Image: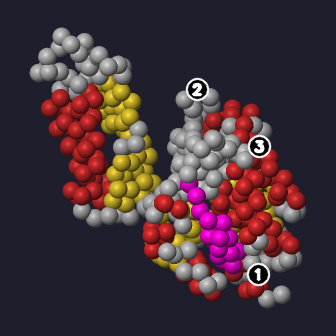
Amino acid sequence: MDLSDLRVNGERLRASLEEMAKIGATPGGGVQRLTLSDEDKRARDLFVGRLEEIDLEVTVDEMGNIFGRRPGKNDELPPVFSGSHIDSQPKGGRFDGILGVMGALEVMRTLHENNVQTERPVLIVDWTNEEGSRFAPAMVASGVWAGKLDRDWAYSRTDRDGKVFGEELERIGYKGSAPAKAWPFHAYYELHIEQGPVLESIGKTIGIPKGILCLHWYDVYIEGKANQVGPTPMEGRNDALCAAAEMILAVQSVPARMGGNMVATVGEIQNYPNSRNIIPDGVHFTVDIRSWDDHLAINAWEQLKIDFQAAAGKNGCPIRFEETWRVEHTPFAEKLVGLLAQKAEALGYSSHHMVSGAGHDASYMNMLGDAAMIFIPSIGGRSHVEVENSTWEDCESGANVLLHCMIESANEV
Ligand SMILES: [Zn+2]
């Protein structure tokens, strides 16, 4: 058959997504499949079964990453691979991550049922703990695989209940024996929902990110002085929460003040002792800064430290910072970005060049070799929430682009 006529089976893709959405389904229509939870285990078991059905060679590595391999005619050549993550946010959506895994599975099924022999081997992957919501940081297992994070450090991460990553991995039976160590690859593709409003607002089907924004995480700790709120006059208070309020507004205004393309967010805050009649004596909050321009993001943080010191001084509250995590912006391989645009056009789908504001496992793959991503529209631009949604038609279109890019790359010798 002419390979250009090949299409994925949209109904089957839908069924596989719906089947996965039942595991950890929430009353609000989303899923909660926290990494290394019982739900994660059930979804993994189902996934592995699906890989075995189509005779893929399954490997689980010591980080719990699951690979399914389909041999190539030249089996020694570096493979082409694709995947994403099965884990979700707490009360997350039915498409984030799992679309990229079920999309790649649909590609593998299509190759299998049509007996398509590619020159290079083709692999599918599920990366452990992409979300980082149970065990920080995010993208931890692809980071270890890529040699950017230490395996034993990853094993030692704990969740809020004090459960340890390495022990939880073992408990669910997915601490494999293969080393979590990168091997050479020819191309890596990741199909994902956009998680933003752009594609829907301009009415395009396929988003082609030129890369992923830099991602800088900080933690800020403020110390105040606790006291009974009634007898303590307003003058001379050391109210850590009021200091934090001024700092949070400084974060909100920093992108406009610095100019350029950037977003800055305080998403998490803890206030102590968090009692209505005690002046707060301790606050911790997080700062997340993203931009295509790493220097701009770093300058913004430098500016924020000045703003924070000023607010701390004004409120008489000592402050401490931690620079928790920095990932540089990553431009994707131009060759693959071009191929994505070409295949989208050949398939008759409208497409749009953009950037990814969210981090993905593809960031780490892109540090090692050629990587690229395919986005499809998120209805209402919503993600990491139960109402996260995309149309089945767009899921199918994204999987078709993935199919043709993978075939093309896998036949390059
Ligand atoms: Zn994701």
Which element is circle 2 on?
loop
Q: Residue furthest left?
A: 235
Residue depth check, mark 1 versus mark 2: number of the one nearer the observer: 1
Q: Quadrant of residue 235?
A: top left
- Amino acid under label 2? Gly
What residue appears at the point 23 percent right and 49 percent down from the top-left corner? 303
| Quadrant holding the N terminus | bottom right
Asked if one can make out residue 314 in the rendered structure from this viewpoint, the answer is yes
- For the residues marked 1 and 2, what is the alpha-carbon distance in whole angstroms? 49 Å
List the residue tagged with mark 3.
Answer: 42
Q: Residues within 10 Å of mark 2 (few under 14, many from 20)?
A: few
- Between 259 and 383, the one lying in front of the other is 383
The answer to whether mark 1 and mark 2 are in CB contact below 8 A is: no
Q: CA distance from mark 1 to mark 3?
A: 32 Å
SS under mark 3: helix
Which residue is at 28% across, 49% downward?
A: 252
Segment tinted magenta in the rendering: 388-405
Q: With 75 as the anchor, is 86 left or right in this view?
A: left
The tag earlier along the polypeptide, 3 or 2, is 3
At label 3, the amino acid type is: Arg
Which amino acid is tagged 1?
Leu
Q: Which residue was labeled with disc 1?
A: 6
Q: Answer yes or no: do the residues labelled 3 and 2 have beta carbons within 8 Å?
A: no
Mark 2 CB in 8 Å range of ligand 1? no
Specify few, some or many for label 3: CA neighbours under 10 Å numbering under 14, 14-19, or 20 or more: some
Against 390, residue 286 (above or below) is: above
Q: At 69% across and 34% down in the image, what residue appears?
A: 168
